Image (cartoon, rainbow, N blue to C red):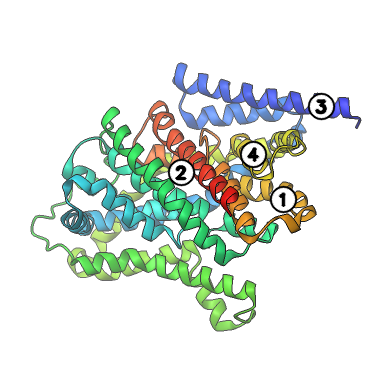
Amino acid sequence: MDQSTMAHTTQYLLSVAGIAIIFLLFLIMKLKVHAFPALIIVSFCTAVATGIEFSQIVPAMLSGFGGTLASVALLVGLGAMIGKILEVSGGAQVLADTLIGWFGKKRAPLALGVASLLFAFPIFFDAGLVVMLPVILSVAKKLGGSVILYALPATGAFSVMHAFLPPHPGPVAAAGILGANVGYLVFIGLIIGLPTWYLSSYLFGLWAGKKWYAKVPDLFSQNDMDTADRKPPKFGTVVGILLTPMILIFLNTGISTLQATGALPKGNTALAVISTLGQTPIALLLTLLLSLFVFIKAFEAKRLNELCEKALGPICSVILVTGAGGMFGGILRTSGIGDALASVLSDMGIPVILAAFIISVCLRVAQGSATVALTTAAALIAPIVTKNAANFSQIDLCAIVAAISGGSVVISHFNDSGFWLVKGLFGLDEKTTLRTWTVLETLLGTIGFLFACLIYMIF
């Protein structure tokens, strides 16, 4: 294929991507089509317009849908059951009351954000969010006001840790591709991530919560549950349940990291068993079993079964829409739109750290997945870094990884499963989610990139 043909193809693919997003906005916001069928319609039309073979369109759609559900459905379903039990038992209220007592009512959003930062270190974004969800909603119900005020500081905390900090897969993979030291990256990630969270999630969350009102959703409503005569669990019991998946997942990631560096042997049966128990779905399943065991006397088996059943109904829509968002992202990847964006920017001759950020942004906007954007951008930048290896210190390499990480989270929109997860779990409409979550993610990525640039220039 000659250069003119390649340029024409790239321009066409980028045009299709832009039209697809506009069409999706039109369907959802103007025609009021539900997001689930709207995403399926746009995914199919995009596949046809980009020339994917007709025999491959449905498999590509199902692959994106199923791949997203494989990672999201189990986590959200198990997390919702745990959340329902904690909510009805009074455990979430105990935790909320304790946090408010420590920080004060006026600093409740800060308390939720700090707790989420701690929980987010070893746990992925979606798993951490569903575990903390009953606490967030419980605090919001108790103190009143818009759920946005409490949701954004906590949700942003999970996002910033997932983007910038090992042992999360994106930064770890990018560090491996670029040859950055993971230990340094933890240090640099904290320096960048903590102030970035404060500015982009906490302060913006306070402002957005006052500007836009959204009522607290009844995701864990207990209208039909009489808990007045039931003694709530102790604070330590609730924290123990919440920490169980964190500890298991942390053990898994710690073992994997040490095995990758050679500090621990591979093939050890005991370590393999511990790592398996620390896989996020298994960790949440074990946490659910622990919750059932802890509350079996208070509720009896039949009532616990009813609680688990009731927990699944409200999240079905969340899971299906999230899967459809993954379908759209999968079609964009299969069509080559993400590669087209990357090719336009990879040879523009701009500074490496800026090129890394821009490429990551374009990949993120095109296909939705932060991890895919991060790892792909790192792979595209790697030849430049390798060619000029003598000019980059370990601090420089970590700053470049952080810049890519920042670009990988900006402009969360309809092809990002996280967009639909936040929208569904907190009961927001699409317009409000764009005004709040999309802006938060854009601030988070941009501010993180600016801090990375500052470190890059100073050191």
* Cβ atoms at labels 4 and 2 below 8 Å apart: no
Reading the image, the residue beneath label 4 is 363
Residue 142: which quarter of the image? top left
Which residue does the image show at 88% across and 29% down from the upper left?
3
Give the SS element for disc 1.
Answer: helix
Quick check: 68 above or below 414? below
* Cβ atoms at labels 3 and 2 below 8 Å apart: no
Give the SS element for disc 2.
Answer: helix
Quick check: 140 above or below 90? above
258 relative position to 314: left or right:
right
310 relative position to 389: left or right:
left
Camera-nearest label, 4 or 2: 4
The tag earlier along the polypeptide, 1 or 4, is: 4
Residue 319 tag number: 2
Badge 3 amino acid: Ala
Residue 7 visible: yes
Residue 223 visible: no
Which residue does the image show at 41% across and 26% down from the upper left?
431
The tag earlier along the polypeptide, 4 or 3, is: 3
The tag earlier along the polypeptide, 3 or 1, is: 3
The tag earlier along the polypeptide, 1 or 2, is: 2
Mark 4: give few (<14), some (14-19) or many (20+) Cα within 10 Å: many
Reading the image, the residue beneath label 1 is 379
Which residue does the image show at 69% across and 27% down from the upper left?
14
* Relative image position of residue 405 (x, y in whole percent): 57, 48
Residue 209 tag number: none
Camera-nearest label, 1 or 2: 1
Mark 3: give few (<14), some (14-19) or many (20+) Cα within 10 Å: some
Reading the image, the residue beneath label 3 is 7
The tag earlier along the polypeptide, 4 or 2, is: 2
Q: Quadrant of the N terminus?
A: top right
Q: CA distance from mark 4 to mark 3?
A: 18 Å
